[in-house]
Amino acid sequence: MKNESLIAQRLVYDAVNLSGGPIQFVQNGKITRTLLQYARTSHQRYHESLAAKSDIEKNQSGVEQERKRKQQQFDEVEEKRRNLLAEYKFQAHECDKQLQQLRANL
């Protein structure tokens, strides 16, 4: 929107200067219905642009929250996996000790 606004402002500025300046522009009747209508609706277009920008930011925020939620789920499952592996390794080590003791008693 900023870029479009700057271009539009420059076009109007150039048109006014080419017609002899602001006073000559008005005196020669260069202000048309279309130009007046465009000026009247510019504020509405500005607010529509702000609303669109706000919607885009909200959507990006929602996407970011979803990504964080998925990352948290991933981290929880990964932690659970690590805990289970550690527990099974401990149990396997205990079984190995028992087997060694039984072999020694044979």
Image: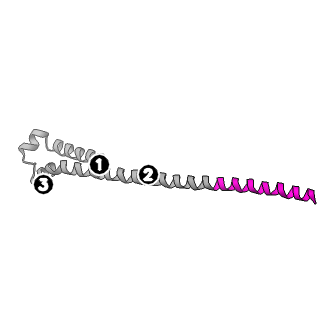
Magenta range: 81-106
Tag 1: Cα neighbours inside 10 Å, few (<14), some, or many (≥20)? few
Q: Amino acid at mark 1?
A: Met
Q: How is the image coloured?
A: one colour
| Position in image of residue 23 (x %, y %) | 9, 39
Give the residue at the far front of this rendering. 105
The secondary structure making up most of the magenta span is helix
Foreground of the two, 71 or 100: 100
Please tell me whether residue 105 belongs to the stretch shown in magenta.
yes
Q: Which mark is residue 64?
A: none
Mark with earlier residue (2, 1): 1
Where does label 3 land, which residue?
A: 34
| Position in image of residue 96 (x %, y %) | 82, 57
In front: mark 3 or mark 2?
2
Q: Amino acid at mark 2?
A: Gln
In space, the residues marked 1 and 3 are separated at their CA atoms by 21 Å
Where does label 2 land, which residue?
A: 65
Where does label 1 land, which residue?
A: 1
Q: Quadrant of the C terminus?
A: bottom right
